Image (spheres, rainbow, N blue to C red):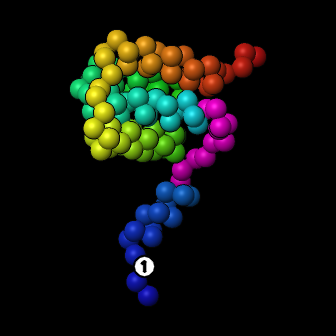
């Protein structure tokens, strides 16, 4: 019996990937940054998109699931903005939204001091 390479790949991912339990508020903070990243990319605010990725890389545990959640929300947000035909927010507006979302995410993932 021949095994599908896709099935072997998926099994490897599930076995090899560490998991982490995160709260709803932590997940929402990642999703919000993904949403804003999608908007920034669609609107060609590339500096803001880089700023979001840097903030995430510095604050979050390095786990595939968190990155995938962020990337999926980025894609969803990007496509939603295209399909809706809505205008891009101003650069100052998106920058302010990003700053608030980064502060929120950092608060949610802040390590307790020991």
> Is residue 31 found left or right of 76 in the rendered image?
right
Secondary structure category for the residue under label 1: loop
Q: Is residue 61 above or below residue 6?
A: above
Q: Residue furthest right?
A: 114
Q: Residue at x 45, y 68 (%)?
A: 8
Q: Is residue 3 above or below residue 78?
A: below
Q: Residue at x 27, y 33 (%)?
A: 42
Q: In the image, residue 64 lies at what x, y percent? A: 48, 44
Front position in the image: 57 or 98: 98
Front position in the image: 4 or 44: 44
Which residue does the numbered mark 1 point to in the structure image? Answer: 3
Q: Residue at x 62, y 19 (%)?
A: 107
**Residue 18 magenta-drawn?**
yes
**Residue 71 appears in the picture as rendered:** no
> Is residue 7 found left or right of 79 in the rendered image?
right
Q: Residue at x 40, y 76 (%)?
A: 4
Q: Magenta stretch mostly in which secondary structure? A: loop
Q: Is residue 56 above or below residue 24?
A: above
Front position in the image: 30 or 78: 78
Q: In the image, residue 49 lies at what x, y percent? A: 33, 25
Q: In the image, residue 84 lies at what x, y percent? A: 32, 41
Q: In the image, residue 46 lies at what x, y percent? A: 27, 23
The magenta span reads: 16-26
**Residue 81 magenta-drawn?**
no
> Is residue 114 found left or right of 76 in the rendered image?
right
């Amino acid at each position: 019996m021949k095994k599908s390479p896709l099935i072997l790949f998926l099994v490897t991912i599930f076995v090899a990937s560490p998991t982490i339990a995160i709260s709803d508020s932590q997940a929402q903070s990642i999703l919000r940054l993904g949403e804003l990243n999608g908007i920034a990319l669609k609107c060609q605010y590339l500096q803001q998109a880089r700023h979001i990725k840097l903030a995430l890389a510095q604050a979050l545990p390095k786990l595939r699931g968190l990155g995938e959640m962020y990337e999926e929300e980025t894609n969803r947000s990007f496509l939603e903005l295209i399909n809706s035909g809505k205008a891009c927010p101003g650069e100052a507006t998106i920058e302010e939204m990003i700053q608030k979302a980064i502060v929120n995410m950092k608060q949610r993932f802040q390590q307790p001091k020991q």
